[in-house]
Image (cartoon, rainbow, N blue to C red):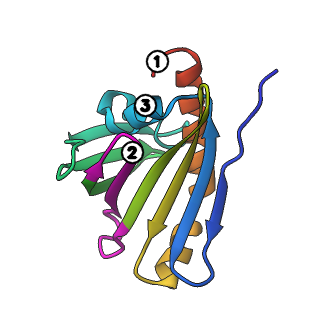
Amino acid sequence: MTTIAETTIEADPTVPVIRITRDFAATPEQLLRAHTDPKLFVQWIGPADTRARIEHWDARSGGSWRYASEGNGEVYAFRGCFHDVGPDRIVQTSTFEGNPEAVALETLRFEALGPGRTRLHTQSLVDSFERRDARLRTGMRTGLNAGYAKLDRMLADGTV
């Protein structure tokens, strides 16, 4: 029996934050590796009809990153800085280059739930409710669910 995990996406009514929660059949170490190893990250990020390529990746506290996704004849580039990379969390900035003034401060936290289970908590803070709501309208749910489904398969087959 295959169970598809649900991704919860919530917009905070009092601050311009998006909170995302998702459970994985993985250890915190595996999820950290999937988010910091460019060879793994590029395999699962984004919808199935896109291909990602890493342009720059330095996954350490003080490092930076840039990748581009291609699909349907379009290229979408993203960049940011890793402010803190630790065993149970990542703090980074994230910018879609098509809207460079909309920088998000993101915190990813890996909560161990027991043997082989981890809850990923992501918080994305932007500078206005308008920018937050625009992010929510981009198809974020579809892209996240597709990417996380790919990550589930990679965890199940031992790639991560």
Rounded to the nearest whole Å, what is the CA distance between mark 2 and mark 1? 21 Å
Element class at badge 2: strand
- The residue type indicated by label 2 comes to Ser
Q: Position of residue 132 (x, y in %)?
A: 51, 75
Residue at image coords 57%, 63%: 19
Judging depth in this view, the residue of 118 and 129 nearest the camera is 118
Q: Nearer the viewer, mark 1 or mark 3?
A: 3
- Residue type at tag 3: Glu
Q: Earlier in the sequence, mark 2 or mark 1?
A: 2
Determine crowd level at label 2: few under 14, some 14-19, many 20+ residues with C-alpha closer than 10 A.
some
What residue is disc 2 on? 69
Q: Name the side, left or right, on which 73 lies relative to 19.
A: left
As for residue 148 lying within the magenta part, the answer is: no
The image quadrant where one finds the C terminus is top left
Tell me residue 100's x, y (percent).
Answer: 30, 70
Q: Which of the two residues, 34 or 55, is positioned nearer the viewer here? A: 34
Dot 3: element: helix
Q: Which residues are magenta?
A: 84-104
Which residue is at a point 22% across and 44% down the rendered structure image? Answer: 60
Find disc 1 in the rendering and name its residue: 159
Q: Which mark is residue 77?
A: none
Are the residues at dot 3 and dot 2 in contact (C-beta closer than 8 Å)?
no
How far apart in space, not on screen, are marks 1 and 3 (Cα)? 13 Å
Position of residue 124 measured from the top left corner of the image (x, y, whole percent): 46, 65
For the N terminus, which image quadrant? Answer: top right
Q: Which residue does the numbered mark 3 point to in the structure image?
A: 29
